[in-house]
């Protein structure tokens, strides 16, 4: 009985050694086939090159992550500033103070004209959108413009130069401001 166990144990060790030998031969033959196909130095160089590339990619990845964090912070700052500016605009709209645009310079003896200008494209269904892409929504309501010019015709020419009718701007009212020098107001 002991002899049977001993024979079985010797047979098992022999078979495992034989399997190990066959596996080792397969690995060595496989390595040689790869080395013949690509060359021994080529494979080693490829492995070294790819290892270097991997470290460079990791370095580049960490740099990109740092850049993204920095840009994320910049975007948040811009959004915060935009929100603050939009709040200031809304506060100024609700404050009751009206924005008055000025054209020309005040010159002694030159009359000032109050002109109401509106943009026909803003708030209009012409473009099938609620807001115009380039013009502020406030232009849907008449905006006050003070024009300093020698005559009403010159004032109208300055208005049309600054706010062209081709872009939808239209004068709804034009009136000369009464001053001590001007006896009568003209309206058009």
Image (cartoon, rainbow, N blue to C red):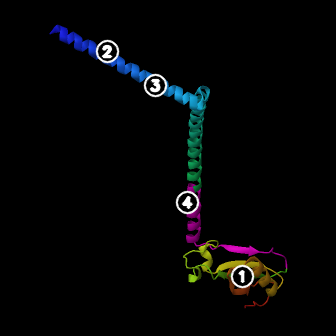
30 sits to left or right of 100: left
160 sits to left or right of 133: right
Mark found first going from the N terminus, 1 or 3: 3
Tag shown at residue 83: 4
Q: Within the magenta stretch, is there residue 104?
A: yes
Residue receiving disc 1: 166
Mark found first going from the N terminus, 4 or 1: 4
Q: Which residues are magenta?
A: 79-108
What whole-number distance in Å separates the C-alpha atoms at marks 2 and 1?
Answer: 100 Å
State the SS at label 4: helix
Tag shown at residue 128: none
What whole-number distance in Å separates the C-alpha atoms at marks 4 and 2?
Answer: 81 Å
Expressed as whole percent of the image width and height from the top left, the position of residue 121 reads 62, 80
Q: Nearer the viewer, residue 40 or 93?
A: 40
17 sits to left or right of 165: left
State the SS at label 3: helix
What whole-number distance in Å separates the C-alpha atoms at marks 4 and 1?
Answer: 32 Å
Residue receiving disc 2: 14
């Amino acid at each position: 009985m002991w002899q049977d166990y001993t024979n079985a144990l010797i047979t098992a060790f022999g078979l495992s050694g034989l399997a190990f030998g066959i596996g080792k031969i397969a690995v060595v033959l496989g390595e040689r086939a790869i080395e013949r196909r690509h060359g021994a130095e080529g494979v080693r160089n490829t492995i070294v090159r790819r290892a270097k590339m991997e470290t460079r990619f990791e370095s580049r990845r960490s740099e990109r992550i740092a850049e993204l964090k920095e840009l994320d912070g910049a975007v948040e700052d811009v959004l915060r500033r935009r929100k603050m500016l939009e709040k200031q605009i809304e506060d100024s709209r609700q404050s009751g103070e009206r924005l008055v645009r000025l054209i020309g310079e005040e010159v002694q003896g030159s009359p000032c004209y109050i002109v109401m200008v509106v943009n026909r494209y803003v708030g209009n269904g012409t473009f099938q959108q609620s807001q115009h892409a380039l013009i502020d929504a406030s232009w849907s309501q008449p905006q006050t413009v003070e024009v300093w010019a020698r005559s009403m015709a010159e004032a109208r020419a300055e208005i049309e130069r600054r706010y062209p009718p081709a872009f939808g701007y239209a004068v709804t009212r034009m009136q000369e401001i009464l001053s001590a020098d001007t006896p009568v107001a003209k309206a058009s």
